[in-house]
Image (cartoon, rainbow, N blue to C red):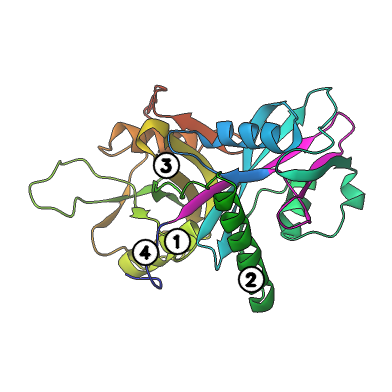
C-alpha cells in the first residue's frame, strides 16, 4: 500500500544535553542563524547514539555521557526522521563558536529562546517520550530549503562539498499484545514453502510518511486493527546500514484476517530477534525508556511473553 510518492528516508539525530543544574545546551546555527539542538545526519556505518555524541562535539565542543534515545520526529516536506537523544554533559564549557555554529550556550528549561522545531526542545526539557510529525508552513519550508541550498553551493565552492545522505534500510516492527497481555500478534509466512517460523508484523519505511504511520496503516489494511503505537525499542546493524524501530501496543482481542494470529502465552515459533523484541517490550523501563540493541549484541528470547 502506497503512502504518497516513494522516496528514501533520510536519518538524522538531535541531542538534548543537560548540564548538572538541568540547563539545556543549544547552538546558534551558522547557516540559518537560529537556535537549535545540536544535531545532524547519520553517517553510513554509524550508530545513532554515536552520531548524537559526534554532532554534539563537532557543533558545541561538548562531551557527554549516558546517551539514551527519547523520541522520534518526522519532518514532513524533508522526508527526514530525527531521533532525539538525551545525555549529561561533562564539566567543560561549550565552545564559544565552531565552524558550524555562531554560539553555544546553556539555557534553563523555562527560558528556552524562540526557535524552529521548538516542540523537540520542549519535549527534551520535559523528558517527554514522543513520536511526532512536524509540519513546516509552506513559506517557512521554502525559505529553509533555499538557505540549505545556498549552504550546499557555498560549501562546494569552498572545496568542502557536502556528502549525499546515505541510504539506510529502515523497518518498523510491531509488538501488539491483547489487552489482557496473554497473546501477541504474529503473522504466517507469505511465501509458500518458506520457513515455518511466524514473524512479527514489519514494514519497510521510506520518506513518504512517518514510520509509525506506515506501520499503523499496514496493520489496519492487512489485519483490521487500529493500535495506538508507542516507540519502545531500537535495533541497529551499523555496518549494514540496517535499522529496525520497534513499536508496541495493546488492543482488544478480535478476529484477525490475512495471515494474522494471536499466539498464546508461550511464544510461537519466531525468529530469535522477533522473540527477543517480545520479551524486551515487556520489561519495565529503566533509566532509558527506549531499549537499544546493536547487531553484535546477543539477544536472548526467553520463554514467557509476560511474567
Q: CA distance from mark 4 to mark 3?
A: 19 Å
Q: From this viewpoint, is residue 179 visible?
A: no
Using the numbered discs, state the Cα–Cα distance from disc 1 to disc 3 in whole angstroms: 14 Å
Count residues near mark 4 (Cα–Cα under 10 Å), then give few for <14, some for 14-19, many for 20+: some
- Residue 100 appears in the picture as rendered: yes
Image coordinates for residue 106, horizontal then vertical, percent: 87, 40
For marks 4 and 3, give the one nearer the viewer: 3
What residue sits 43% from the left and 62% below the top?
A: 214
> Dot 3 lies on which element?
strand
Q: Is residue 132 magenta?
A: no
Q: Are marks 1 and 3 in contact (CB under 8 Å)?
A: no
User: Which of the 4 quarters of the picture holds residue 148?
Assistant: bottom right
Q: Viewer-nearest of labels 1 and 4?
A: 1
Instruction: Residue under label 1, please give it.
Output: 207
Q: Are marks 4 and 2 in contact (CB under 8 Å)?
A: no
Which percent across, then down, holds residue 229? 52, 56
Which label is found at residue 243? 3
Mark 1 is surrounded, within 10 Å at the Cα level, by few (under 14), some (14 to 19) or many (20 or more) other residues, namely many
Disc marking residue 141: 2
Q: Which residue is mark 4?
A: 218
Marks 1/4: CA–CA distance:
16 Å
Q: In the image, is residue 36 part of the stretch drawn in magenta? A: yes
Q: CA distance from mark 4 to mark 2?
A: 29 Å
Q: Position of residue 1 (x, y in %)?
A: 32, 69
Q: Which residues are magenta?
A: 9-38
- Number of numbered discs visible in the structure rendering: 4
Residue at coordinates 75% horizontally, 36% vertically from top-left? 60
Q: Earlier in the sequence, mark 4 or mark 2?
A: 2
Amino acid at each position: 500500500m502506497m503512502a504518497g510518492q516513494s522516496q528514501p528516508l533520510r536519518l538524522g539525530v538531535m541531542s538534548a544535553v543537560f548540564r548538572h543544574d538541568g540547563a539545556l545546551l543549544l547552538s546558534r546555527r551558522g547557516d540559518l542563524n537560529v537556535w537549535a539542538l545540536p544535531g545532524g545526519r547519520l553517517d553510513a556505518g554509524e550508530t545513532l547514539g554515536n552520531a548524537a555524541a559526534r554532532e554534539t562535539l563537532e557543533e558545541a565542543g561538548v562531551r557527554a555521557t549516558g546517551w539514551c534515545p527519547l523520541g522520534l520526529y518526522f519532518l514532513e516536506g524533508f522526508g527526514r526522521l530525527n531521533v532525539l537523544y538525551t545525555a549529561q554533559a561533562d564539566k567543560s564549557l561549550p565552545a564559544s563558536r565552531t565552524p558550524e555554529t555562531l554560539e553555544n550556550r546553556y539555557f534553563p528549561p523555562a527560558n528556552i529562546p524562540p526557535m524552529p522545531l521548538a516542540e523537540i526542545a520542549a519535549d527534551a526539557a520535559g523528558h517527554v517520550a514522543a513520536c511526532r510529525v512536524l509540519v513546516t508552513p509552506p513559506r517557512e519550508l521554502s525559505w529553509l530549503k533555499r538557505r540549505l541550498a545556498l549552504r550546499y553551493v557555498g560549501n562546494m565552492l569552498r572545496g568542502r562539498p557536502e556528502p549525499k545522505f546515505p541510504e539506510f534500510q529502515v523497518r518498523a516492527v510491531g509488538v501488539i499484545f491483547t489487552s489482557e497481555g496473554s497473546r501477541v500478534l504474529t503473522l504466517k509466512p507469505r511465501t509458500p514453502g518458506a520457513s515455518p517460523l511466524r514473524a512479527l508484523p514489519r514494514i519497510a519505511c521510506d520518506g513518504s510518511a512517518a514510520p509509525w504511520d506506515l506501520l499503523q496503516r499496514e496493520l489496519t489494511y492487512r489485519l483490521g486493527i487500529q493500535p495506538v503505537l508507542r516507540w519502545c525499542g531500537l535495533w541497529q546493524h551499523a555496518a549494514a546500514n540496517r535499522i529496525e524501530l520497534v513499536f508496541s501496543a495493546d488492543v482488544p482481542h478480535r478476529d484477525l484476517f490475512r495471515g494474522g494470529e494471536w499466539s498464546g502465552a508461550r511464544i510461537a515459533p519466531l525468529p530469535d530477534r522477533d522473540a527477543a523484541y517480545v520479551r524486551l517490550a515487556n520489561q519495565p523501563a529503566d533509566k532509558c525508556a527506549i531499549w537499544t540493541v546493536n547487531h553484535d549484541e546477543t539477544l536472548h528470547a526467553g520463554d514467557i511473553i509476560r511474567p
